[in-house]
Amino acid sequence: MLEVKENYLMNDYRNHIGIIGGGISGLTLGCSLLKEGIPAIIFEKMPEETSHGAAISLSLNALRILDMLDIYTDLKDQSFIHSSASIQGPLKEISAFKTPEVLTTRRQTLMSLLYSRYINLGGEILHHHDLANFDEVKCEATFTNKNKYILKHIAACDGIRSSIRDTFFAANQNPKYSGYSAWRGIGKSNLQKIHFALGPDSHIVSYPINKEGDVSFVAVKKEDYQFKESWKEEGSISDLLDDFSAYDSKIFPALEDSVTLYKWGIYIRPPLKSMIAKNITLLGDAAHPMVPFLGQGACMAIEDSYSFAMACKEHMANLANAQEAYDYVRSKRTKKIQQLSMIQGKVYHLKNPILVATRNAAMRYTNIPGNDLKRIHNYDAHDEMQMHLSIHATKFVSG
């Protein structure tokens, strides 16, 4: 970590949970904690809100939580709600199926609503705060701007390249290229549902993100070249079409209307045995980055944040107990979704003609895709954590 020669003890946040990172997980955690009356402060290294990331999808397991945080109604008004999807090969349709409710929107729309809710709850965000050092015994955080704070606890929401994970988790391994790269952009189309196109070693998913005709697409290709892990790397229409030459170019929304095209490498980290350490809890991509093939990355971050806040409310006098409850409940859930996401990627990118035909027949004549999604989306993070906390409390009393 960067050594800081001079430190200045700033405002007293010793009763606050310090949240490192003001992305989706950090803002959701801030809202969840403040709504429960638990003091929280967000430290964000960027100077202001950023808009990187084109669009996201959110399923019922996350939307329930956003509803409990009083965000869902406003989000729904600025987004698109889906109940069906279609799947095709490079040139013809394979299947159409019903899905549980899925909301798609611009990432920045969700971020802005979370930010507004956090501020309205009395939250504070300190920008230009890039963590330099954390003393886990004193629970003292020092930043590269030389500011220093004593906190009650650190919640690491600082993404796949989490400096906290790198420093304090012995089983840690660096981010590793998953074997997939992806393009993304937003164009114009009259598409009214989620649409998948599957081809050899590739797939494209498109979906409207509002009622104004804006359509987001993500085009994923399996390739050995380790493209950099950056959501800011711009690409060209010609390079995109070259990468997906097996498809009819009309499958993409009107590309000339796409403000910017981006290409990035999809990176992963192996699951940790535990997402907690002394005075430190990992959430979201800092804990369990995953490939995007089930659309659950943001959903897991939202589930994590709400679940940890519930555990903190129950065990505020001893946050080590809150950590144990969080780790027990969330480790099982997130490891399973990480695994299923990797499997889904393999299903999407089959090359063997026999396996492709088998997959397509299963999709055409059964509702396997919709049923698989339903099992994931029906998970209720509130009920799951509440059940665990109740059982733990009963054992504690009876013991």
Image: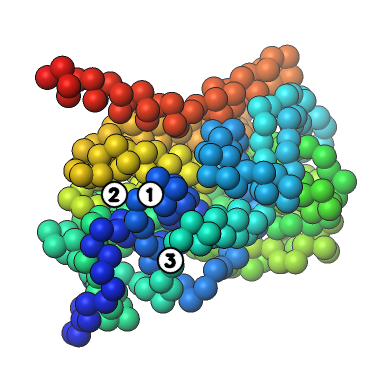
**Mark 3 vs 2, N-terminal side:** 3
Q: Quadrant of the C terminus?
A: top left
Snapshot quadrant of residue 26: bottom left
Q: Is residue 357 visible?
A: no
Circle 3 residues within 10 Å: few <14, some 14–19, many ≥20: some
Q: Is residue 58 visible?
A: yes
Q: CA distance from mark 2 to mark 1?
A: 19 Å
For this rendering, which residue is in front, 256 or 108? Answer: 108
Residue shown at 82%/36% (left/top)? 91
In the shown orientation, is residue 215 left or right of residue 121?
right
Q: CA distance from mark 3 to mark 2?
A: 20 Å
Which residue has dot 3 on it?
124
Q: Colour scheme of this structure image? A: rainbow
In the shown orientation, is residue 39 left or right of residue 211?
left
Snapshot quadrant of residue 151: bottom left
Name the kind of residue labelled 3 in the image.
Glu
Residue shown at 73%/38% (left/top)? 81
Residue shown at 44%/31% (left/top)? 382
Name the kind of residue labelled 1 in the image.
Gly
- Residue 153, horizontal then vertical, whole percent: 25, 55
- Residue 375, horizontal then vertical, whole percent: 54, 22
**Mark 2 vs 1, N-terminal side:** 1
- Residue 362, horizontal then vertical, whole percent: 67, 17
Which residue has dot 2 on it?
281
